Image: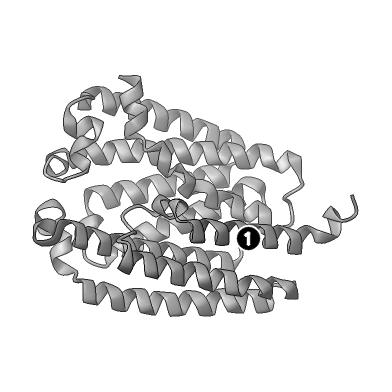
Amino acid sequence: MIKEFIISMRPRQWYKNLVIFVGIVFSFNLLNLNLWIDAIGAFAVFCAISGSIYVLNDIIDIEKDKTHPKKCMRPIASGKLNKSYALIFAIIFIGLALFVAYLINLWFLVSTIAFFLLILIYSVFLKHFIIVDIIIISTGFVIRAIAGCFAVGVLVSPWLIICAFLLALFLAIGKRRHELVLLRGDAGNHRKILDGYSTEMLDQMINITTSALIMSYSLYTFFTGKIFIMLTIPFAFYGLFRYIYLVHKENFGGEPEMLFRDRGMLFTMILWVILIIVILYGNIIFKF
């Protein structure tokens, strides 16, 4: 039963909470071991919260998930995990997560509660409104990034907020497009809101979001004070264009973790991370 509950918490999607570490990296505190204790604690808190929300969402959508070609295999939808036990475990995990958040600091606790309430309201109500659904999902990533800054006590950059929001929106639109292609004429039966979308509409939204993201990231590199960060622009652009290619040609986009299976994307992300660390911390690294 515990195994099925952990599966329902979607540990493979906890990588989404890695955005919490953006604050400690871009505030030049990557080598501050004391702050890493709080950063890792914040990551664990959001893994527990987001995982518990996945469980609550599965309980809410149990009947719809039974008709989905893939989601019907989930523990709650398939009957492997009793929804009453799942609810009890989820409440326990949420309680423990909020207690740890309180131990980190008050502002981090506030951002954690805000994230929980936003995603819970989304699961119950807001996910039924076209366009609002993908905006709420993207806002959730912004709260993660802000919470990561609060956890280590650094300033929240406006560039962090806008880039995190646009990237999350970009991925959310790609996911909606994948659902339309996968479910085809049956899309509305699984998720009623999908009747309001079309692949043509989502393609236009991807184009708009990509343009805004490219401009925002470029402006960030111009004004960050580290001129060599501009060297990361080609890698960021390639990653975005590669994702669009995979969405259209390889039918990727259902879950962003699928991108880690693509060698081109994986290689680009690794190079981008290495470049960022070398540029931001080169003076310290080369002293050793």
Q: Quadrant of residue 277?
A: bottom right
- Residue 53 drawn at (x, y percent): 34, 40
Does 282 sit left or right of 106 as displayed?
right
Of 183 and 161, the residue lying toward us: 183
Using the image, determine if residue 204 lies above or below residue 87. below
Amino acid at pointer 1: Leu
Which residue is under mark 1?
271
- Residue 118 drawn at (x, y percent): 36, 51
Residue 147 appears in the rendering: no
Q: State the quadrant of the N terminus.
A: top left
- Residue 52 drawn at (x, y percent): 36, 35
User: How many marks can you see?
Assistant: 1
Does 95 sit left or right of 223 as displayed?
left
Way the structure is coloured = one colour
Of 2 and 165, the residue lying toward us: 2
Q: Quadrant of residue 69?
A: top left
In the rendered image, the residue lying farthest to the right is 287
In the rendered image, the residue lying farthest to the top is 1
| Residue at 75% across, 60% down | 278
- Residue 82 drawn at (x, y percent): 21, 23
Q: For numbered disc 1, what is the local secondary structure?
A: helix
| Residue at 75% across, 40% down | 33
Residue 230 appears in the rendering: yes
| Residue at 31% across, 55% down | 254
| Residue at 60% across, 50% down | 21
Please tell me how crowded label 1 is: few (under 14), some (14-19), or many (20+) other residues with Cα within 10 Å.
few
